[in-house]
Each structure stands twice: as C-alpha cells, then as structure tokens.
Image: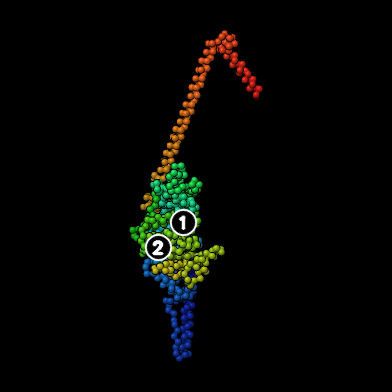
Amino acid sequence: MTDADARIEAARRALEEATAALAAAEAEAEASAAAESEPEPVPVPVPEPESAPATAASVSGPLDEQQLEAVRAGYAFEAAALEIGAIVNGEAVPGVPVRIPLAMTNRHGLVAGATGTGKTKTLQVLAEQLSAAGVPVFAADIKGDLSGIATPGEPNDKLLARTRGIGQDWVPAAAPTEVFSLGGRGIGVPIRATVSSFGPLMLSKVLGLNKTQESSLGLVFHFADEHGLALVDLSDLRTVLQYLTSAEGKVELEGIGGLSKQTAGVILRELVNFSEQGADIFFGETEIDTREFLRVTDDGRGVVSLLELPGVASNPALFSTFLMWLLADLFNELPEVGDLDKPKLVFFFDEAHLLFSGASKAFIEQITQTVRLIRSKGVGIFFVTQTPKDVPDDVLAQLGSRIQHQLRAHTPDDATALRQTVRTYPKSGYDLEEVLTQLATGEAIVTVMNEKGAPSPVAWTRLRAPQASMSPTPEDGLRQLVASSSLYPRYAPVLDPQSAHEVLTSKMNAAAERERAEAAAAEAEKQAAKDAKERERAERATRSRTQTRTTTRARQDTGGGNVVSDLLGSRTGQTIVREVVRGVFGTLFKKRR
C-alpha cells in the first residue's frame, strides 16, 4: 500500500464514520419528531462509538458479525502462540488477530502460493517469532532472500502504515543466524555427509535408478557394511562396484546374491554423471552433526540455520534429497519426547516440489513415515511450495496448519487445482474459489490446528511484516557471520580417512600383482621348456653331424683308388660340386621369375 493509498483509505474510513454518525443523527431526529406527534415515546437505539469501526468493517466484508466473532474466538489461544496477522473483512480488523499455537508448530504445516505472493516473507515472519520463542529453525535459502533475517529491518512510511493497519507494534530486530553451504559451495559453514550415512534409498532417488538397480545398490551397501568398508565419498562406492564385478569380488557375493555387470555399469555411469554435476563436494568428511541445528543462544533465542543453495537449479534432486537426509538423520539421533510446549526444531522445506518430483514409491513412503513419526521427536516441518498438489496426499494429510497465498487459474489445469484446493478447507463464510484468486500480496487464507488438535476457522488474513530486513544481507555481512562462527574451524577441513577405496584398491593391486607374478612364472616355465627342447634339438643335430663325418672318413679310408671318387671326396671336388649346384638353382629361379 502506497502513501496515497493509505490517505485514500483513511479518508474512506472517515467518510464511513461520518455516514454512520449522520444516519444516527437522522434516526434521532425522526425519533424526536415521532415523540412530539405520539403520546408515548419510542426508544431509538444509538450505536456505541466503540463498536462502530468493527461494525463498519464487518458490513463491508464477506463475514457477518457472528462469523467474525467465531473467528475471533477460534484464535484466542491461552498458551504461547505465533502472531500471523489480522483478519481481513473488507479491511483489516486489528481486533481479530490470527495466530498459531507454538506447541502446534510441531504438527507440521504448509505455506503455498504462486510466485511473488509473499511466501518467503511469511516464512521469515514465522522463523523470527520461533527464534524469539527459543525454538531453533532450519531453512534452505533458495533465492538468497531469507538472509535478511540476520539484519535488523529499516522502517519506512509504507511499512509502518501496513503494520499499524493490522495492529502490529513493529520494531526492527534481527535473529541469531548461522550460515551453511552445501559441501562448501558458497561462503557458509560446509555441510557434508558420508555416502554410508546417506544410504542406498536416497542415493537411488538422486541417481534416478529403477527398482532393480536400487536393489542392487542396496546389496553393495550391505556388502560394505558386512566387511567394514567405510563409504565416505563417491570414489569409495565406485571402487566397491568395480571390485564386486571382478573375479575375486564375485566369489564373495555368492552367499548373498550376485551383481550383474550390466547393472553395475549403469550405476557407475550415473555416479560419474552425478560427480560431474558437482556432487563430489557434498560427500566426504568432516560430516556434519545434525544436532548443531538445535542450538539456542545464551539469552534463550533459537539459532536460525540458513543453508545457501546458489546452484540448486542445476541439481534440484541433490538439494531436496539432502534435506530429506537431514530429517532422517535427526529422526535417528533424537529421543522420543512426545508432545512439548514448544518444538525442539522447526524445519522449513522450501521449494518442496523438488523433493517429490520423480520420486519412487519407496521414497515417498519413507518421507510419509518420517513426517508422521518425527513429530514425536519434537521436530516440526513446514513445506513451502506453489500449490498443495505439489505435495503427495499422504504427506498433505499429516499437515496441521495451512497458510495459502494467492492461487492463479490461468489454465484449465490451474482451475482444476484451485477447485481441489478449495475442497480441502473447512466450511466458512468465504467463497474460497473466488477469494483465493483475489488475495493481495502479503495476504493468505489461514487455518491452523488449535490447542485441542481441531482445525481453527478459515480466516482471510493480512500477514505481519518481518522485523528483520526484507532485503538480503550483503555478502560482507554474511562473511563476517561465518568468520565469527565457532562451527567453521570444526567443519571446514576436508579429511581423507582410510576407506573402501584405499582398502579395496590395495587388495585389487595385490591380486593384480599376484596374477602378473603367476603369469610371469608360467611364461618363464614355458620358455624354459622351449629352451630345453631347443638344446635337445641342437644336441641331436650335433650327434648327427658327428656320425656323418665319421662315416665319410670311413669311406675315404676304404677307397680303392677310384679317380672320380677320389676327386669328389677331395676339397677341390667339393668346391666344384657346390658351384655347379648354385648355377643350376640360380638358373631355375630366374626362369620362375
């Protein structure tokens, strides 16, 4: 609302009040005239000045006075509550606040609405109040807008006019903030996880594996666990796959099933593609301790953990699955606590449609189970997305509070989604199919779970303004936060422990060395046999030549004086014979050519 709009609104309200006063005066004048003409006076009710503004507001909106009072009573909680805003009935009615019980924030919720309708600011309002109430918050900062929560806001006339209109006593305030980055891609404290803790089911979802490939990947993880092979990074997993498809590895798999080379090849190719997308930086040591997200400051405020995600558009599956891993890890780490006065942590799952897009049935079942059971661990989850249809029905059924910003119905599919959304709300005095398309930025249709676990009345709400900056915190400010963090020295170093890659590479190298030695020994043995045969052949040839010379001499010794024989047997005769033979064969070869 601009300054001009505010002045117009004030003038309109003044006109309404003047009109009401004029009507009262005319009624009084008519009553006086009637009293003079009739013997008995007729009493005329005069409206009380206090109720005039509320009556005017109720008359100009879709709810009558009785319905407005029902909304007021439906949000009048006795326990601690988060202030969401004030009801809109033609105009905002500050005397009818809309709230959510603090204890019910661990019953999960949904913040939905089209792009540009104010979802991020709603998230910021909730996060600020949760922090002030001593509840830690974790949120993924997809677009960088949420980082303003670390910087006090700056007042202006437009802001103050809005906050006064809904009865908000606005003062600038920042929340204690810790900035994280995924695998060190950014300026925040690096968050890493080992492949072992990530698990085969979530990794299969990221890699887009089918059911058979997912089962085979589970077998690989089982083999690694059974043999004490630490899967720290993706190179460890690749090495295990290569080992299990080798001759030695196949033998070790015989007792628990096999792994085909084709399936292993598909998984290896997907791992290579995954690495090329930058996933290598996320997997490794030092692994984050998810209990770091449960910290509270010395003055009792909950720490807001913001995860920077500058490259989420290039790999949404990694982002969404990583956040699901965080929840699963928290579920495994935290004890059962039942219902608390306030949750241990509230987790905001922004761009939630990325989590469910292309997810397998097994993955959806795991998410549903986690959402259903993690409440008993004291953790609340708010899914933030564009339309409720982005969230599977089984998950949507677990969400107790809903803040629905404007929906657009520009296409037949949008219109269908709008009607489906309307059917999920309790009955109210609103034509929700019309109202949901007319909500202004910063307004929403709200229904929450009350203290008794029942849904509150549906309320058209003008939402509160954040007390921190609605603009992103400058990069220099974020760098100062990270530099002063006690977590950065602990999680920034990249460690390279002894893991499956080193163990199996050494084992495969030793096996290859043995094979080379055995091959060399076999070759040497073969060569020795060959040499022995050659020696034996040479010896036979030598014996043969010796026997020939002995026979020749014997013949020479027994010669009878034959001139031809003597000549052929002499050195000169042998020379003549060789020359004659060479000439004959030379002639023959020439003729062949």
Q: Amino acid at mark 2?
A: Asn
Q: Is residue 230 visible?
A: no
Residue 288 marker: none
Q: Is residue 26 visible?
A: yes
Residue 11: give x, y in percent of width and height. 48, 72
Q: How many angstroms separate mark 2 from mark 1 (CA)?
A: 24 Å
Badge 2, how many Cα within 10 Å: few under 14, some, many 20+? Answer: many
Q: At 46% across and 62% down in the image, what residue appears? A: 394
Q: Amino acid at mark 1?
A: Ala
Q: At 43% across and 58% down in the image, what residue appears? A: 139
From the viewer's perspective, is the residue at label 2 or at label 1 nearer?
1
Q: At 42% across and 61% down in the image, what residue appears? A: 372
- Residue at the extreme bottom of the image, as rendered: 39
Q: At 44% across and 56% down in the image, what residue appears? A: 324
**Secondary element at image label 2:** helix
Residue 156: give x, y in percent of width and height. 44, 64
Residue 362 marker: 1
| Mark nearer the N terminus (2 vs 1) | 2
Q: Quadrant of the C terminus?
A: top right
* Relative height, residue 35 to residue 174 (above, below): below
Residue 493: give x, y in percent of width and height. 39, 47
Residue 106 marker: 2
